[in-house]
Image (tube, rainbow, N blue to C red):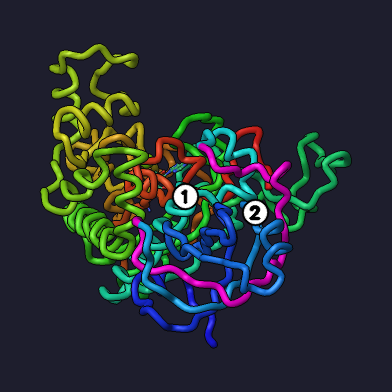
């Protein structure tokens, strides 16, 4: 007899089929002479209802051990269910308990727990309905992303996690060292002597795989990264993590407009894919987490994103009959309140803002004519704010060298990057999508800590 997954049985199971299932007990209800147990194996939101009666060997002992959280194997026959709520259930012939869960101490008893509490038990929280649905949707998002790019002939490239360059230039780097921190070697100037460190120079956890993606795009034309990135940003918000996953496509022979087109097509594709793959989980979010989430998905898929320049965005913000905490004037970096006003209140859909002032953006962005702005774009999403950041890259060697000097970046350390402009340079563009912000946007989960299995944030690296 074959072991089947619960999702498959709920979808395809037929009365009289003999099956084995393995999973964890969610609930038990004992009546006179028989009992119901709901068993969940993570394959779907709904569990399978199992009916046990006195004919099951060692029924009385089993019944004591079948408690919420216990792991169980049941073999039996599928029968049409008499009860409401499910079409099919499993009439047990026999059952084995692999591991018991003491009802006195198992933290996930049948009641609603706060997300704050669940974070303190991140090793168990995936067994709840909400976190289970989150991680299935997260998986579907990842599958959608690979499918989208693979269908388009983009190469998945693996950018390094340890790097010597600060791509974003924001100084939010975690240092990687194998020095004994209590005995740091010093040079003659009294500074830490990194020539004695593992890599012979300072090294960091990457904040972005973009620079390496640019290298690969100059050989393969279209590439994408999908991996973890790290930022030592001391932002304790519901949208920042110190370790998050990023997807970074990079396209040769592409300009800012092509970049915006790809970003829009990409987000639409992911939403549609997840709706098709996880309808039950998405219904769940719509019912219990955010009642607008299905409407939002529909809005994303069926409407064009708004597209405005930064200068237009500033004018709209100045006209807004709303008091912002951070005053608006040309030159400021948009704050989350500004981003959300534009996407949520004004456009009521995602908005792509382009051509930001050069002084608030990274060195690699292409300088616009007039030299006040750069060919940057941010995609702002309702409820989230910035979900994507990207740009057309500066492909002109002389301009890039000038920008690097203006911004006090050490040119020697990125000679290899300048080589890309020296040998066969082409216009190119790309963007970075924050994976956890995408999952938040998709599910309506308000805190980013609840869409990644083990969140890393200031003062927290548990589990
Ligand atoms: O806008 P960012 O900093 O852009 C880059 O890193 C570029 N190198 C991307 C590129 O052009 N290839 O980051 C990109 C996205 C943001 O829009 C946001 O969604 C996410 O990464 N992000 C974070 N997500 C969670 N926690 C943080 N601390 C994040 N910082 C950025
Ligand atoms: Mg950004």
Element assignment for label 2: loop
Ligand 1 closer than 8 Å to label 1 CB: no
The residue located at (36%, 61%) in the rendering is: 86
In the image, 230 versus 20, the foreground residue is 20
Q: Dividing the picture into quarters, in which one does residue 259 lie?
A: bottom left
Q: Which quarter shows the N terminus?
A: bottom right
| Rendered image: mark on residue 129 | 1
Q: Give the range drawn in magenta.
A: 84-111
In the image, 204 versus 410, the foreground residue is 204
Q: Are marks 2 and 1 in contact (CB under 8 Å)?
A: no
Q: Does the magenta stretch include residue 91?
A: yes
Report x, y in % for residue 257: 16, 53
| Rendered image: mark on residue 108 | none
Where in the image, quadrant-wise, is ligand 1 located?
top left
Determine whether 92 is above or below 398 in the image.
Answer: below
Q: Is residue 28 visible?
A: no
In the image, 384 versus 73, the foreground residue is 73
The residue located at (16%, 17%) in the rendering is: 320
Closest to the camera, between mark 2 and mark 1, is 2
Classify residue 311 as left or right of residue 359: left
Task: Check disc 2 and report the residue beneath it.
Answer: 67
Report x, y in % for residue 412: 54, 53
The residue located at (53%, 29%) in the rendering is: 236
Q: Distance between the residues labelled 2 and 1?
A: 17 Å
């Amino acid at each position: 007899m074959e072991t089947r997954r619960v999702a498959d049985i709920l979808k395809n199971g037929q009365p009289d089929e003999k099956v084995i299932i393995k999973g964890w007990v969610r609930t038990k209800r004992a009546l006179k002479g028989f009992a119901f147990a709901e068993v969940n194996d993570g394959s779907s939101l709904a569990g399978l209802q199992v009916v046990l009666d006195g004919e099951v060997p060692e029924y009385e002992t089993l019944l004591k051990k079948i408690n919420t959280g216990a792991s169980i194997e049941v073999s039996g026959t599928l029968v049409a269910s008499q009860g409401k709520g499910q079409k099919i259930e499993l009439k047990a012939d026999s059952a084995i308990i692999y591991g018991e869960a003491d009802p006195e101490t198992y933290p996930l008893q049948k009641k609603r727990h706060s997300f704050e509490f669940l974070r303190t038990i991140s090793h168990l929280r995936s067994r709840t309905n909400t976190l289970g649905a989150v991680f299935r949707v997260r998986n579907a998002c990842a599958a959608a992303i690979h499918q989208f790019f693979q269908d388009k002939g983009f190469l998945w490239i693996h950018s390094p996690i340890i790097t010597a360059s600060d791509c974003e230039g924001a100084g939010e780097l975690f240092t990687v060292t194998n020095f004994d921190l209590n005995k740091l070697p010093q040079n003659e100037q009294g500074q830490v002597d990194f020539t004695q460190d593992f890599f012979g120079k300072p090294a960091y956890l990457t904040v972005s795989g973009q620079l390496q993606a640019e290298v690969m795009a100059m050989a393969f034309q279209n590439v994408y990264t999908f991996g973890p990135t790290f930022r030592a940003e001391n932002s304790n918000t519901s949208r920042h993590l110190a370790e998050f996953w990023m997807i970074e496509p990079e396209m040769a022979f592409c300009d800012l407009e092509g970049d915006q087109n790809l970003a829009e097509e990409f987000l639409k594709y992911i939403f549609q894919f997840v709706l098709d793959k996880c309808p039950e989980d998405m219904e769940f979010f719509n019912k219990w987490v955010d009642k607008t989430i299905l409407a939002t998905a529909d809005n994303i898929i069926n409407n064009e994103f708004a597209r405005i320049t930064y200068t237009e965005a500033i004018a709209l913000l100045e006209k807004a009959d709303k008091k912002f905490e951070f005053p608006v004037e040309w030159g400021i970096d948009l704050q989350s309140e500004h981003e959300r006003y534009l996407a949520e209140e004004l456009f009521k859909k995602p908005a792509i803002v382009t051509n930001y002032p050069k002084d608030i953006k990274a060195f690699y962005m292409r300088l616009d004519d007039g030299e006040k702005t750069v060919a940057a774009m941010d995609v702002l999403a309702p409820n989230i704010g910035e979900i994507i950041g990207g740009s057309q890259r500066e492909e002109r060697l002389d301009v890039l060298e000038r920008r690097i000097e203006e911004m006090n970046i050490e040119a020697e350390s990125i000679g290899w990057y300048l080589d890309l402009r020296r040998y066969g340079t082409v216009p190119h563009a790309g963007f970075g999508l924050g994976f956890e912000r995408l999952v938040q946007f998709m599910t309506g989960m308000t805190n980013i800590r609840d869409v990644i299995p083990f969140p890393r944030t200031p003062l927290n690296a548990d589990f």
